């Protein structure tokens, strides 16, 4: 129950961060204090004096305050439920929103960078003419525009970083983003496949015979289908770590080394549109854009269903993605980038 009015908020309370308006200075400045819930149902002051200067507050028409994440025991990439309450002793005055919010602390990049490559901004048009669906939720430019891909060696895992031109979350994807569907294929050992797995067949591409894929990772804003890894020899799905840093328009993926011992090799990075109801959770791109389907695709049966693709230096994304041939039943053959 809340500290002062004793009201149930619909979730278990562990901490209460409080601003006492009666103790603000005349200019509206003050400090917030953290209280921890006790096993007996009470509250005890838990903010140490050493963090006082990091708990500043200011109240005017807008109330603002800051609190170090470590005070709440929140680790990067983890989530927290919270609610804003106005109360005084014995009286509950209100709350916002009506239901608790689920907030996620941004994941920090960690490890030693072993690879990075920029992708041209503004090329999220597939072979050259793809456009977004017409619903206003797709109106922000760059939501399918990959601008950087990087790989880090993070001790017992590999951390992959995907930076986008924009990364809004209008549908409140639990992993911090809504729109992109990231399809990552790795050639990191002998053998492999040149055709798509069943779990990604809707993308409609194939792979360079010189670099068949061994590992496939699908990433989306929903953990039910967007943190999965398969191998070309039929193993999986394994679960990988997925987090985001909305301030930097960044998606972070952590792959345990016990699943992928060495990530150096050849990588294919594709960006499609996420659709929770689409085949393989991929949003189709047709000849003409509709409210919930992309447009500009001259042959929806054979053309790649991806908006962006990390193409090797010296090659053109438009050239590679346009090289499909319906007459002989051939998908566009992708070329990978080398990660050393």
Image (cartoon, rainbow, N blue to C red):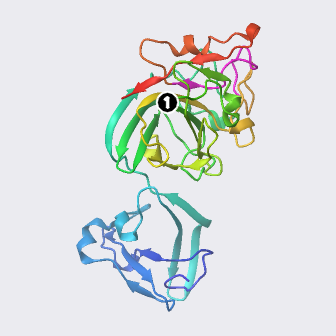
State the quadrant of the N terminus: bottom right
Question: What residue did someone put label 1 on?
Answer: 146
Residue at 69% over, 18% down? 303
Q: Please provide percent x and percent y for residue 71.
A: 35, 70
Q: Residue furthest front?
A: 190
**Residue 316 vertical placement versus 269 (above, below):** above
- The part of the image, by quadrant, that contains residue 144 is top right
- The part of the image, by quadrant, that contains residue 47 is bottom left
Q: Nearer the viewer, residue 243 or 132?
A: 243
Magenta residues, start to end = 294-309
Q: Residue furthest left?
A: 50
Q: Nearer the viewer, residue 281 or 49?
A: 281
Compared across the picture, whether 293 is left or right of 205 comes to right
- Whether the magenta-drawn stretch holds residue 302 is answered as yes
**Dot 1: within a 10 Å radius of its alpha carbon, few (fewer than 14), some, or many (20 or more) residues?**
many
Main SS, magenta region, reads loop
- Whether the magenta-drawn stretch holds residue 303 is answered as yes
Q: Nearer the viewer, residue 90 or 179?
A: 179
Q: Please provide percent x and percent y for residue 41.
A: 51, 89
Q: Please provide percent x and percent y for residue 185.
A: 54, 32
Total residue callouts: 1
Compared across the picture, whether 290 is left or right of 179 comes to right
**Residue 258 vertical placement versus 217 (above, below):** below
Instruction: For residue 145, say whether it is visible.
Output: no
Residue at 34% over, 49% down? 155
Residue at 59% over, 83% down? 7
Please tell me whether mark 1 sits on a helix, a strand or a loop.
strand
State the quadrant of the C terminus: top left
């Amino acid at each position: 129950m809340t500290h002062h009015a004793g009201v149930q908020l619909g979730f278990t309370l562990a901490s209460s961060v409080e601003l006492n308006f009666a103790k603000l200075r005349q200019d509206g400045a003050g400090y917030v204090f953290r209280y921890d819930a006790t096993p007996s149902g009470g509250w005890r002051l838990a903010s140490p004096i050493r963090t006082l200067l990091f708990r500043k507050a200011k109240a005017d028409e807008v109330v603002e305050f800051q609190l170090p994440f470590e005070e709440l025991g929140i680790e990067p990439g983890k989530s927290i439920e919270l609610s804003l309450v106005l109360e005084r002793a014995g009286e509950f005055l209100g709350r916002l929103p009506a239901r608790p919010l689920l907030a996620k602390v941004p994941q920090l990049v960690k490890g030693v960078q072993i690879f990075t490559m920029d992708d041209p901004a503004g090329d999220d048009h597939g072979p050259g003419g793809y456009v977004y669906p017409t619903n206003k939720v797709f109106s922000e430019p760059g939501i399918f525009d990959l601008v950087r891909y990087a790989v880090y060696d993070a001790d017992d895992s590999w951390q992959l970083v995907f930076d986008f031109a924009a990364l809004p979350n209008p549908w409140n994807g639990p992993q911090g983003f809504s729109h992109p569907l990231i399809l990552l294929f790795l050639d990191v050992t002998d053998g492999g496949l040149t055709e798509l797995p069943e779990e990604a067949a809707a993308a409609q591409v194939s792979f360079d015979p010189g670099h068949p894929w061994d590992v496939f990772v699908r990433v989306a804003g929903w953990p039910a289908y967007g943190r999965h890894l398969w191998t070309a020899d039929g193993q999986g799905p394994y679960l990988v770590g997925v987090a985001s840093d909305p301030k930097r328009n960044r998606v972070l993926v952590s792959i345990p080394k016990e699943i992928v011992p060495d990530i150096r090799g050849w990588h294919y990075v594709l960006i499609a549109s996420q659709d929770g109801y689409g085949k393989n959770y991929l949003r189709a791109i047709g000849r003409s854009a509709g409210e919930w389907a992309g447009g500009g695709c001259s042959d929806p049966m054979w053309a790649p269903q991806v908006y962006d693709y990390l193409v090797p230096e010296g090659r053109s994304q438009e050239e590679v993605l346009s090289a499909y041939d319906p007459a002989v039943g051939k998908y566009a053959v992708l070329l990978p980038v080398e990660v050393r």
